Structure formats: C-alpha cells, structure tokens
Image (tube, helix red, strand yellow):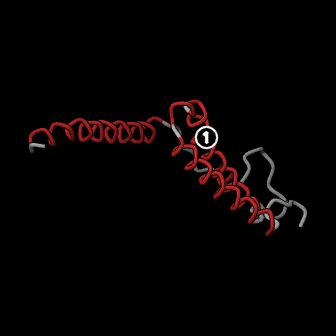
Amino acid sequence: MPFDALLENYLAVFLATIVGAGLIATALIAARLLAPFSNQGNKRTSYECGMMPIGQTRTQFSFRYYIFAILFLIFDVEAVFLFPWAANLVNAGHAAFWEMVLFIGILAAGLAYAWKKGVLQWNK
C-alpha cells in the first residue's frame, strides 16, 4: 500500500479526533461559563434535601455486588456474540459451530466456578 493511500485513510480518523476533542472542549468551557455555581454550605452536604444528614453518609458495599455485576457483563457480552451467530448458523459452517460450543463451554465453566464459590448467593 503506498504511503499516500495510508495517509488518506488516516486523515478521516485524525479529523474526527480533532473535531471530537473540539466539541468536548467547547462543552466543558460552555458549562463552566454558563452554569450557575453556589458555594453555600448546604451544597457541600451529601444530600441536598434541606435536612442535615444523620449519621454516616458514606456506606460500604459488599464486594459480591461487584462480582455479580462483572458476571452480568460477561454473560451480556456472550449474548452479543451468540445472537448474530445463531441468526447466521446455517451459513456459518461446522467450524463456527464448534468454536461457539467451545466459547459457551468456557463461559459455562466460569459460571460453574462462580456458583461453586458461592458468588451467586446473596445471604452469606
């Protein structure tokens, strides 16, 4: 591939990057200039409902919520790969079928491991 063609292909990417950075900078500057700001004491509280918070305003969450969320994302990504494969299964061929069986098997092994470790149980 000649060097001129390579530069021509990346020119659109470079221009899109410049335009995107310009739009982000414009939005941040406009928000800083046009948005109302207040430094009153109530604005710095955790909840702006008019009442002072009682007790500690910061709560800790169990790590199980995060692991559960990561598992949800993993199986959500699986669905992204699985639906187009299932829609095109007839034209995909035998190799694509066995690759997807391997993919689902790896995910099933991960789910079995998480289940064995008790990650999916809420009341521990």
Figure quadrant of the C terminus: bottom right
Q: Is residue 59 above or below residue 52?
A: below
In the rendered view of the protein, which quadrant contains the N terminus? top left
- Give whichever of 102, 116 is nearer the camera: 102
Report the residue at 78% width, 45% height from top. Answer: 50
Residue 43 appears at what percent x and percent y?
Answer: 65, 49
- In the displayed structure image, the side of residue 5 where residue 100 appears, left or right: right
As drawn, 117 above or below 34: below
**Residue 110's x, y, as percent?**
69, 61
Closer to the camera in the image, 7 or 34: 7
77 to 16, vertically: above or below: below
Looking at the rendered structure, the number of numbered marks drawn on it comes to 1
Amino acid bearing label 1: Leu
On the image, which quarter does residue 117 sit in? bottom right
Relative horizontal placement of residue 114, taking residue 13 as reference (left or right): right
Which structural element holds mark 1?
Answer: helix
Q: Is residue 92 left or right of residue 82?
A: left
Q: In the rendered image, which residue does mark 1 sit on?
A: 82
Residue sitting at 62 percent across and 49 percent down?
101
Q: x, y (%) of residue 58?
A: 74, 62
Residue 20: % across, % down: 34, 38
Q: Nearer the viewer, residue 114 or 51?
A: 114
